[in-house]
Amino acid sequence: MKKSLELFQKIVHNLLEDEKKNPVAEFVPADALFERMDLALEEHPISEEDLATLLQDLVFKTPRTATNAFFNQLFGGRNDKAILGDLLSVMLNNSMYTYKAAGPMVGVEKAVLGKVCNMIGWDENSGGTFASGGSMTNFMGMLMARDAKQEDARYKGVANNLTVYTSAESHYSTPKNAAFSGIGRDQVRSIAVDDWGRMDVKALESAIVKDLEEGFIPTLVNATAGTTVLGAFDNVDTIADICSKYGIWFHVDGAYCGSVIFSKKYSHLLKGIEKVDSFSLNAHKMMGTPLTCSLLMVKDKKYLYNSFSNDASYLYQTDHDDFNLGKTSLQCGRRNDALKFWTLWKSVGTQGLEQMVNKQFELADFARDYVRNHPDYKDYSIEDSISVCFNYKGIPARDLCTLLYQHSQLLVGYGSFNNDEFVRLVTINVNNDTDVILKFFKTIESFVEENKALLLKNRLSV
Ligand SMILES: *Cc1c(COP(=O)(O)O)cnc(C)c1O
């Protein structure tokens, strides 16, 4: 063990040093991957030395998500305290299902979830759990909605007329989860959005009324706090009232930006959150913990027991069950994802979490101002979002992003809204400052200037 940990230290040290010089890993085309690297598994072991060399090579060629040139995903950067917590959870290797197996780590998980529920404004009937990602916490929300509406679904199977409502800009996990849950993809109503990417609440109510008239059973409304492309926030407050009027479970998918709950300045974007039935957020996005750290909060924890406890119902729950987290979990064996967030939270306080959220919006404001003040750029962003969307000199976003990637310049992605395709800069890495954002734009500008020929070869006009 000692030797392996020393090797770990050495590789990580080398990586951190190299990242300073080369924030983007060398680009290895997928079709050349197995020629360029020895990944095949053999009958005989390789030497410790060869293994060390191979591991370092593998690490060095892997995309670098923590550097100041990575803007591609809805996560980025490295938080040392969260990493410390996660490394410890790997060493301890507990599974979170029972107090017997996880001991005080159960308390760690409950402390995190309890505090978030408390910040939402919920009482002691509330609860929550962790799952292996935002897609899965959304899935759990959908299962609770299904079981709340059709109580015997768990025993008899699902009726064929349950319906789900989510905006056209929401994450693809909702239709996928509708397939998993037996509700069915065809029963998902894609609700139109307004010009700012938010669910059109009038269209939502009309769709519900129409379904009721046609004999469907509206079961779940899924709203998004931070849509994947634009970073838009659906109007939770108004949608909550519609759900309560028609008796529909209301889940908020805050995987991307639900963490605004930690900021006094930006929690207004979740106005009405105390009225929802369930709410998910990914701490591995805005809070910068290692993947994955996905929280699900439920206003009335009895629904968690109803849907996820295999034996006794909530009624037979003893105090002891409150510490046996397996009764409210999707998984059986479950890694300790709470410790990394708890370690971070303990070390910086709620104040520190708030500063992290605020900084992301400050960086986004800075980037949006840059785009708006430079005539070579076209702006597609909305306000109050950490996704900054633009095009440069009319270059198709996918061409620009692909070339920047292939030339190991920047990792940044593109998205589309209303038939426009654009570059999407995500200012989620709090290790960055405004000078890094400025460098991002300068890199694009000089890359385009130096590679006019290449861009033209791609049949682009610059
Ligand atoms: C990222 C994201 C998800 C999925 O979360 P995973 O942890 O990647 O499964 C769901 N919804 C939204 C809005 C997201 O941004």
Image: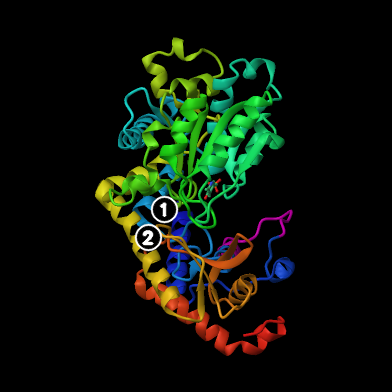
Tell me, for residue 286, which label it has, or none.
1
Indicate left or right for 220 with 158 as reference: left
Q: Is residue 394 magenta?
A: no
> Which residue position is annotated with label 2?
360
Marks 2/1 in contact by CB < 8 Å: the verdict is: yes
Q: Does the residue labelled 1 lie within 8 Å of ligand 1?
A: no
* Front residue of this view, candidates 103 and 436: 436
* Residue displayed at 36% across by 22% down: 125
Q: Position of residue 398 (x, y in %)?
A: 64, 70
Q: Position of residue 330 (x, y in %)?
A: 55, 30
Q: Give the range drawn in magenta.
A: 40-54
* Residue displayed at 63% across by 19% down: 154
Amino acid found under the numbered disc labelled 2: Gln
Amino acid found under the numbered disc labelled 1: Met
Q: Which quadrant of the figure has residue 178?
A: top right
Q: Which quadrant of the figure has residue 240?
A: top left
Indicate left or right for 51 with 440 as reference: right
Quarter placement of the C terminus: bottom right
* Residue displayed at 63% across by 72% down: 402
* Front residue of this view, candidates 126 and 390: 390
* Front residue of this view, candidates 242 and 67: 242
